[in-house]
Amino acid sequence: MREVDWDGVIDAAMDAARAHLASLPTRPVWRDVPPDEIRAALGAGPMPDEGTPAAEVVRDLAKSLDPYVTAMNSGRFFGFVIGGLHPASYGADLLTATWDQNAGLYAPTPGATVAEEIAAQWLVELFGLPADSSVGFVTSGQMATFTALAAGRDHVLREAGWDVEADGLYGAPPVRVVTKSGRHGTVGRALRFLGLGERVASAVACDANDRVDVAALGQELRAVGGPTLVVVEAGNVNTGSFDDLEAVADLADEHRSRGNPTWVHVDGAVGLWARASERHRHLTEGLERLDSWSTDAHKTLNVSYDSGIAITRHPAAHRAAMSIRSNYLIDTEGVREPIDHNPEHSRRARGVAVYATLRALGLRGVSDLVDRLCHLAGRFASELERSGRATVVNEVVFNQVLVRWHPPDGGDPDAFQDEVMRQVAGSGEAFFSGTTYRDERLMRISVSDWATDEDDVDRALSALFAAANAD
Ligand SMILES: *Cc1c(COP(=O)(O)O)cnc(C)c1O
């Protein structure tokens, strides 16, 4: 084996890592930077002819790129839905990078494969799903929904006498897709990947909190028969609301009893974690009766990027949609082969960080984490309402808060929302992102970082009030 300056590389990376993590409490949460500044810092231009020693590259990289790294893990980043970095995940990911396992098959990567197998089993227990559910560790909620719907597409068409894996969609019975108007954009993209297209998806009306209208969903299902995929939500990306999953499960049973192959998928990118909390589990009643679930470990669980999870109650359909065998691969009896559960062929052992984080938190810790995020979201909501400067637009049931700031007399209300967010971002104190909901600009608060505490919320509120009062 060639000699390598591991110490030099590790020292360079770890010195920078320590400095970065230590800087989080004081680093500006957000910076507006012109891309040319970063290009210049990183030496954009023709690729160099000659190489540079690895340790030197790592040291340079840390120096030139770290100033442009957003403090997403600071505890005061409330934009999008961004989980922080749990230390157990961080440590496990450093090891995963070090071990560099191509974790597709047990035989060449037994340790990583079993760590993922255990993580899979713990997740199924944590979420209270059928014990023999199948689990895939994928990159994201996007790929989790894609994976689950690929299994669903296989299942409903197989029940209709069609093998989509072998024969594709030309000539297949049409697959109906019934979803809601407030669905996440990744659902439509998954439908594109699956060859179903976005236009086949109906958009059933929702209530003011973006919960699907159950009566309208029932009507939509009764209108047409045939193989049917239904997509509903646990944790809407704007409002944090949960669909009435018990009612959805009843409608699915009814649809099935009329002879229609039916698969219901739950987009639980944010909200599946409510299952871990006694206080919030009631939001998800009936969820265990559905067919597949997608979630993100990189959101509520605070595992490092990128970490999505696809779970189905139909292991055979999951395997039919995802498995692959080539003449040079090695099969092992009696183990869960990652390659059968995700769309990747070669892949990093991303489930190892999930294992480590679940182990670090325990059932109690995940429950406390969920409750704390929701409690802090509630604190934002009540303080904003109390101030009289803003209206909380959604019913805050989980970790998401939608806010409409009251503009100064004569001010443009929509522009004012963006102005408040821009000023707070500019202060570096905190970051919030916006959304357009029911034709109104709103500020959106997502409390998703395990590191966030009451002090972070109070500092962020001070920055918000300063911005709102500046005009
Ligand atoms: C974040 C999110 C997704 C997409 O997850 P990614 O990990 O970003 O691909 C899907 N649905 C909901 C409700 C989300 O909040």
Image: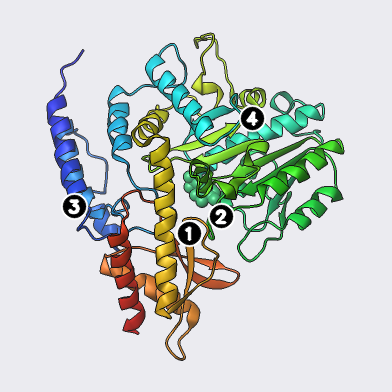
Residue in front for this viewpoint, 461 or 338: 461
Residue for badge 1: 400
Residue 272 position in % (x across, y down): 53, 43
The residue at label 4 has a CB less than 8 Å from ligand 1 = no
In percent of the image, x 64 and y 34: which residue is there?
Answer: 150
- Label 4 or label 3, whichever lies nearer to me, is 4
Residue 244 position in % (x across, y down): 66, 51
- Label 1 or label 3, whichever lies nearer to me, is 1
Residue 125 position in % (x across, y down): 52, 31
- For label 3, the SS is helix
Which mark identifies residue 236?
2
Mark 1 and mark 3 residues within 8 Å of each other at the beta carbon: no
- Label 2 or label 3, whichever lies nearer to me, is 2
Quarter of the view holding residue 431: bottom left
- For label 2, the SS is loop
The residue at label 2 has a CB less than 8 Å from ligand 1 = yes
Query: First in sequence: mark 4 or mark 2?
Result: 2
Which mark identifies residue 23?
3
Marks 4/3: CA–CA distance: 44 Å
In percent of the image, x 34 and y 82: which residue is there?
Answer: 469
- For label 1, the SS is strand
Marks 1/4: CA–CA distance: 29 Å
Query: First in sequence: mark 2 or mark 1?
Result: 2
Query: First in sequence: mark 1 or mark 4?
Result: 4
Query: First in sequence: mark 4 or mark 3?
Result: 3
Decide: few, some or many residues near mark 4? Use Cα within 10 Å; few <14, some 14-19, many ≥20: many
Mark 2 and mark 1 residues within 8 Å of each other at the beta carbon: yes
Q: Amino acid at mark 4?
A: Arg
Mark 1 and mark 4 residues within 8 Å of each other at the beta carbon: no
Decide: few, some or many residues near mark 2? Use Cα within 10 Å; few <14, some 14-19, many ≥20: many
Residue at the bottom extreme, as displayed? 410
